[in-house]
Structures are given as structure tokens and as C-alpha cells.
Image (spheres, rainbow, N blue to C red):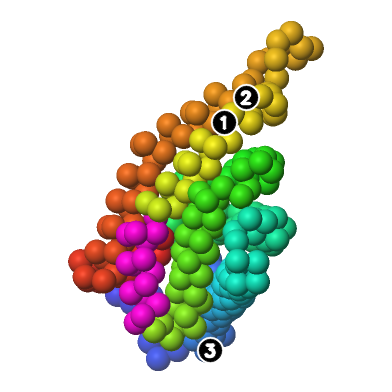
Amino acid sequence: MDDPAAPPPHHHHQLSAPCPFPSLPPGAMASSEEDGTVEEKENNNKKRTKSALVTAWLTFYNIAMTAGWLVLAITMMRFYIQKGTHKGLYRSIARTLKFFQTFALVEVGHCAVGIVRTSVIVTGVQVCSRIFMVWFITSSIRQIQNEGSVILFLVVWTMTELTRYSYYTFKLLHHLPFFIKWARYNFFIILYPLGVVGELFTIYAALPFVRRSGMYSMRLPNKYNVSFDYYYCLIIVMLSYIPLFPQLYLHMLRQRRRVLHGEVIVEKDD
């Protein structure tokens, strides 16, 4: 029997349980989705801005380095045409060479922070060996500056760097001429070994002067109780070319196969 106190059926309202979360106003769900989209857009814009800044910096850097090595090439040619000899050539370009070769340390930083996809070790070895040749051998020992081997590695370096930096510049500008690409991945086949020959003969020529002068060496006894012989250090440097040169040369040959023969579609910078 129905309870007489119960309200009639048409007056009955079913009460829902209170919601533990505040109710969203109309359109709030759409608004939150829009917020997510806005955030995504902001992130994409930040990425695009960062990418544009990196590209702008790399373009500026490569144009500057191309210009620097072009100045070196023109200075060397003018010197030889005017003087008719290579004697004194190194001294005429030493300051410019030291600046641009040392500035290349920036490339190790590019690899370290990941804006260029290249091994930090490979780049570090290449850049530091060049800096060592310039500062601690050729510029430090005036007696060897007129050696033919010095001119050999200078010409090789200049041709290599002009090709390399112009390649990167044109690539960043999305207008890479085929000749520059071809030169980048073919010239090194001859230039790289010639450069190594020039560097090794220059170090070899420096050995007698280093031994006689005792430069950069520390003899015992001294207050630090440390001994260092630069003469033997140079011999070790020469011997290090035996394992390092084949590795770097083969690395470049692999890059050549990838880029020129399409063994790998995606081109990786080196």
C-alpha cells in the first residue's frame, strides 16, 4: 500500500549526487582544448625561432670562414706573383691564419651542443691538430717557416677549407651547385694525404731545432717534480697519424659514398 504522505508522482524530483568537481561552464571543454592547441603552437613557434636563429648563425659563420680562407688564398697568390718565391710567405699570412684556424674551435662547440650532427671527437681531433700545427710548430719555430712542406699543407688547407665552408654555406641557403658538392667529396681524396705529408715533414723538420733549444720542455729537478720533453712529444704526435689518418680518411670515403652515390638517402654532415 502506498504511503499517503508520499508526494504525488508528478511532483517527484530525482536529486543527483553532488559532483566532487566544480561544474564546467558551457564551452569550457572546448576552451581547454583551445588552450592546449595554443600551447602547442607556442612551442612550435619557439622551435621555429630557435631553428631560424641556428640557421642564421651557421650561415653567418660559414660565410665568414669562406671569406677568411679566400683572403688567405688571395694573399698567398699575390705574394708568390710579386716575390716569385715562397720564402717569407708564411710570415705574411701568419696572423690571419692563426685567427681563422683558432676560430674553428667554435665547430667543436657546434657539435657539443648538437646544432651540427657530427662527432665531437672527429671534429675535435681535426681542429686541434691544425691549431697545434699553427701555434706550437710553424709559428713557434721560425727556422722551418720557409720549408716547402709548410707551403704544401697551407695550399692543401686553403683548398680544403674553401671547398668545405662554401659547401656548407650554399647548402644552408638551399642553393647547392653540383660542382661545389662534387668538389667537397672528391678533392679530399688527393688533398687529405698531401696535407698529412706536408704536416709530417714540417714536424720532422722541426725536430732538430726543438732538440737543440729545449723549447716547451721541463727538465728535472724542478719545483713541480715533473719532466716533459717536447722533442719526444712531437715524435708521439707523428706516430699518432698512423692510427688516426686511416680512420678519418675512411670516414670521409663513407660520407662520399652516402652523398654522391646515394647509398643512404639522408645526407649527414661531417
Q: Check the image and report above or below for 124 versus 40.
A: above
Q: Name which quarter of the figure residue 38 lies in.
A: bottom right
Residues drawn in magenta: 178-192
Kindly tell me whether residue 23 is visible in this rendering. Answer: no
The residue under label 2 is which amino acid type?
A: Arg
Q: Are marks 3 and 2 in contact (CB under 8 Å)?
A: no
Kindly tell me whether residue 221 is visible in this rendering. Answer: yes
Judging by the rendered image, the residue that carries numbered circle 2 is: 211
Q: Estimate the x, y position of residue 207 in percent, counting from the top left.
A: 57, 31
Q: Which secondary structure, mark 2?
A: helix
Q: Estimate the x, y position of residue 177 in percent, counting from the top left.
A: 39, 84
The CA span between labels 1 and 3 is 85 Å
Q: Residues within 10 Å of mark 3 (few under 14, many from 20)?
A: few
Q: Main secondary structure of the magenta part?
A: helix
- Camera-nearest residue between 249 and 94: 94
- Which circle marks residue 26 in the picture? 3
The residue under label 3 is which amino acid type?
A: Pro
Which mark is in front, 3 or 2?
A: 2
The residue under label 1 is which amino acid type?
A: Leu
- Image quadrant containing the N terminus: bottom left
Judging by the rendered image, the residue that carries numbered circle 1 is: 207
